[in-house]
Image: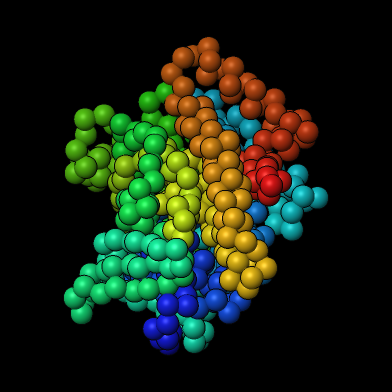
Amino acid sequence: MAASATSKNRVIIVGGGPVGLVSALSLALRDVPVLVLEGYHELFKDLRAGSFHPPTLEVLEPIGVTTKLLDLGIVVPRWQLRDRKEGVVGTFELSLLKDETRYPYRLHLEQHKLTPLVYDMLKPIPHAEVRFSCRVTSVTQSDDGVVVTADTPNGTETFEGKWAIGADGGGSVVRKSAGIDFGGFTYPERFALVSTPYDLGQRGFTDTAYISHPVEWCAVFRLPDVKPPGLWRFLYGCRPNESEEESLSDDNVEERLQAVVPKQGRYETRHKTIYRVHQRVAETFRAGRIVIAGDAAHLNNPIGGFGLNSGLQDAMNLTDKMVGIWRGELDASALDRYVRQRRTANIEYVQEASMRNKRTLEEADDNVRKQRLDEMRKASQIPALAKEIVMKSSMIASMRRANAIA
């Protein structure tokens, strides 16, 4: 894509994933020069995230991304909570949100479909540059700028700018360079993600469903494929002491899928991946001219689809303030408000809700399990209670909480 000037008068974004590229587009569309440095040699195809919540669609609308996502994704109007023995516990209708948002649904689309879409929107902007194969090794700062050092195909290079945004994932070099602590924990079990073209819709599953079981809980959701009915994904925790090879072996995966939804014949699988899951929040999202967002600032388990969404919400909140600073309309202290808003939303809602979702699905105590499922069953049948749940699960409540913080 077109190269920007080598001027220091730019924002340097480390990481060319969804959060980094959306941050770049949001800034560049409002005449802020940007340079994105991505360590991988091309756009990375991450198979994990695939659900967009209403507030995310709202904040992406002004930069032209939401319309493009709607052309590609699957609109999901409801989700189910199920139990392996009892079947459907409750169905929660997102139409209850019709008076709260223009998008009273989830939109399912793999995040690796988002990144090329945003990258293509960046290409014609002359003051936006994306460089691949640039592995950032350090970020330093002074009173009036930042210096980013990276290993590139041309050797070690340094890049100067006014601000640095770290959107470089859980192992963020930017966060580490700024000396920001990343407290929290890592789950002992790994998570597996398996895709199959077998249509669970014909078995009564909504396009998102959470299935409780004290040992082998599971979540399933439908994504677009080359043709209908799409691709179904199973997300589940791997068994203790299994090697990665054992967890993803054909026989093991077949056993796990058949246990959730028994069917005649073997499952056809398209993708299988396994990964570690963390619950962590950085002690701050800003250190001077260095700001972090997305996985660089917080990590959570994937049950509920909060990770990608909270990262994109970070990106738009942060860049809205950075544009104001760039134009001289806001003081740099506006970035401290970004920290207060987004860190609070993450701690009070994203962390708490994602951990609660996992506990609900895997609860081993029969009495506690029955109580929780009964509460959810009752809530699904009473619109006021159901709306309270979907306000939180759709992230509307967390967005409003964040935006209310001065």
Residue at x 56% of width, y 17% of height? 370
Q: Tell me, yes or no, if residue 39 can be seen here.
A: no
Could you tell me residue 76's position as x and y percent? Answer: 62, 53
Question: Count of labels shown?
Answer: 0
Residue at x 38% of width, y 30% of height? 216
Could you tell me residue 283's position as x and y percent? Answer: 45, 41
Residue at x 71% of width, y 52% of height? 104
Could you tell me residue 56's position as x and y percent? Answer: 61, 57
Does 25 appear above or below 307? below
Quarter where residue 349 is shown: top right
Q: In the rendered view of the protein, which quadrant contains the N terminus?
A: bottom left
Does 283 appear above or below 12? above
* The furthest residue to the top: 367
Q: Is residue 277 left or right of residue 336?
A: left
Q: Tell me, yes or no, if residue 189 can be seen here.
A: yes
Image color mode: rainbow
Could you tell me residue 386's position as x and y percent? Answer: 71, 35
Q: Nearer the viewer, residue 387 or 207?
A: 387
